[in-house]
Amino acid sequence: MTSPNGCIDKLFRDARTHGAWLAKPVSDETLRELYDALKWGPTSANASPARFVFIRTAKGKERLRPSLAPGNVDKTMAAPVTVIVAYDLQFHNKLPKLFPHNPGMRDLFVANPALVEVTARRNSSLQGAYLILAARAPSCEACFPACFLARAFALAQPGHSPRVRRRQVDLSAACTFAGVNGTERSRAPVAL
């Protein structure tokens, strides 16, 4: 049996994925607040490989359409903001600043491209989860995310700038204000 904890309840037990959104924009201030919270979440060697692209325009969301699961298309198109959680395959170049107590860490990644890929993918997914938790946190009363594991490579296709191509996109999520009543999905707990 678990003991009552309002914060844990808000983040996990009572949290639900919404299937519809209120027609209310999500401010830049709210997005900055979420990012400012998630950036402190731990990652391997403080790598922080995630890069976030917040999309508000219909044109921008249309670029995601081919990569979305059919059940997520309408929800993504209707969300006031969709965030792409990508990862930077050159994240290790920032390690001298992010992980200064081990100057050789950057070189470890430079010498091992497979380690770069697995570290970037795993830790950017983790940072995407931190975004979801930040949005569910009690201090962010109005913002609830719905996560779509889209494998959205729309922005990493040939023809886009080299700066974008060096990043892979691991997932996208819609971030919006609370779903319309009755659109929440129930969740059955997993028995261990």
Image (spheres, helix red, strand yellow):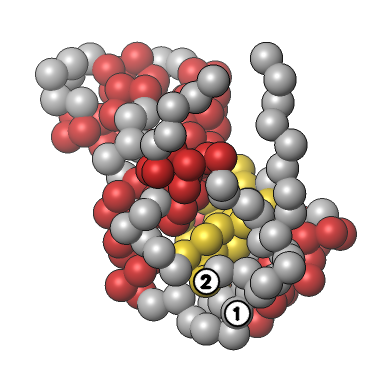
- Amino acid type, label 1: Leu
- Amino acid type, label 2: Phe
In this figure, which residue is indicated by the disc labeled 1?
22
Q: Are marks 1 and 2 in contact (CB under 8 Å)?
A: yes
- How many badges with numbers are in the image? 2
Residue 111 visible at all: yes
Residue occupying the far right of the picture:
70
Residue occupying the far bottom of the picture:
23
Name the quadrant containing residue 48: top left
Residue 146 vs residue 151, the one in the foreground: 146
Q: Please report the residue visible at 40 percent of the width from the left and 43 percent of the height from the top.
A: 6
Pointer 1 or 2: first along the chain: 1
Q: Please report the residue visible at 77 percent of the width from the left and 60 percent of the height from the top.
A: 72
* Label 2 crowd (10 A; few <14 / some 14-19 / many >=20): many
In this figure, which residue is indicated by the disc labeled 2?
177
Q: Position of residue 142 (x, y in %)?
A: 44, 68
Numbered mark located on residue 61 in the image: none
Residue 50 visible at all: no
Residue 62 vs residue 162, the one in the foreground: 62
Q: In this view, does 169 lie to the left or right of 182?
A: left
